[in-house]
Image: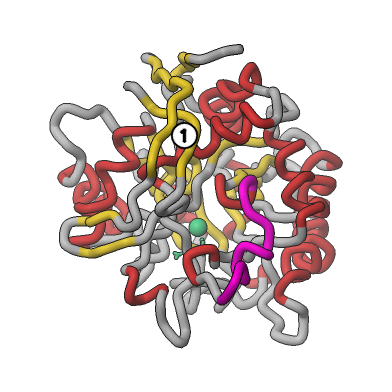
Amino acid sequence: MTDTLTIRRPDDWHVHLRDGDIMRGVVPYTARQFGRAIVMPNLSPPVTSVEAGAAYRDRILAAVPDSIDFVPLMTAYLTDASKGDELARGFREGVFTAAKLYPAHATTGSAHGVTDVANIMPALEHMAAIGMPLLIHGEVTDHDVDIFDREAVFIERTLSGLVRELPELKIVFEHITTADAVAFVDGSGPNVGATITPQHLHINRNAMFAGGIRPHAYCLPVAKREKHRLALRDAATSGSAKYFLGTDSAPHATSAKESACGCAGIFNAPYALESYVTVFDEEGALDKFEAFASENGPRFYGLPLNEGTVTLERAVVSVPKTIDANGTSIVPFHAADEISWRLVG
Ligand code: NCD
Ligand code: ZN
């Protein structure tokens, strides 16, 4: 039995670091675990200009503890008004690594998102031409579509057509939650990859209703049936280069989650690697963890692999009930539970 695992330093290809006091509280958790992270732009107001992206990056860097080397990779928030020239300038100047497509009103902070992909086709064509990746929150927003079907319907209505029209565009289908998404990614060319979160590997939709309503198990896209969780575990541990680590860590104050209308988002940054490696261990796939966590992402993005390593060891870790993020109490993923791996450094 393998009791310690040393891998190349990993990256998080999808994280919400927020802004202001909470940001200063949560950034150290991500920086301790990962060499780089793709930072989501869904602030209020969203990060749409090169200047806003550069200023946000500076605020994040100021929150990284001195002893840690951590590189935030910034993303532009696409709106109906996004222009290819501005995105290309951000990409060229090294401010934007990618651009994020939120269908308008799909999730937290998406009110300014894209109402119809047709509106941004010129910008997407420009991105395809310069090799700038498009990151997609893949859910339709039509309230007539059952919330558990919104990802699968997005593939049918939007994503498959987009991939057909712009086969040279690099697309990351973010935080996939269904067997349908796995089948789509597997069946697409090498320009289509996907991130998978720890929560979608650990929980199915029952977790939201275990003995009562459980707001801390609620995120978007929402966890689906068990068969989907199993398909995601197979995909993540398959060794396919199309799948890589993206936590979608999305901190909200405890009070904003435990509410009559609780926010979507799970804060998994503090124990992210421990959470993922537990899944790979359960699946007998520890030998596949390094590719998923540290290699497939940079290769997809065309970035160098990190230098340095991290080591995890088999040991019981008790996750606290709450975590203080610079004055804001946040309930972490696996709160008051145990995980069977520990990050040693
Ligand atoms: C994210 C957030 O809170 O910003 N929430 C979530 O449930 N994942 C937004 C998102 O990525 O959908
Ligand atoms: Zn997200």
Residue 124 point in image, percent of width and height: 62, 55
Q: Is residue 58 magenta?
A: no
Residue 285 or residue 49, whichever sits in front? 285
In the image, residue 109 above or below residue 70 = below
At label 1, the amino acid type is: Glu
For residue 29, side relative to residue 86 (left or right) = left
Question: Where is the C terminus found, in terms of image quarters?
Answer: top left
In the image, residue 345 above or below residue 203 = above
For label 1, the SS is: helix
| Magenta stretch bounds | 201-212
At horizontal 39% and vertical 20% (from top left) the residue drawn is 310
Residue 320 point in image, percent of width and height: 33, 50
* Tag 1 residue: 274
Q: Quadrant of residue 55?
A: bottom left
In the image, residue 75 above or below residue 158 = above
Residue 37 or residue 101, whichever sits in front? 37
Question: Where is the N terminus found, in terms of image quarters?
Answer: top right
Residue 60 or residue 207, whichever sits in front? 207
At horizontal 27% and vertical 47% (from top left) the residue drawn is 27
Is residue 287 visible in this depiction of the protein? yes
Mark 1: few/some/many CA within 10 Å (<14, 14-19, 20+): many
At horizontal 46% and vertical 62% (from top left) the residue drawn is 77
Is residue 86 visible in this depiction of the protein? no
Q: Quadrant of residue 286?
A: top right
Total number of numbered discs in the rendering: 1
Residue 50 point in image, percent of width and height: 34, 55
Residue furthest out toward the front: 211
What is the image's colouring? secondary structure
Residue 190 point in image, percent of width and height: 74, 33
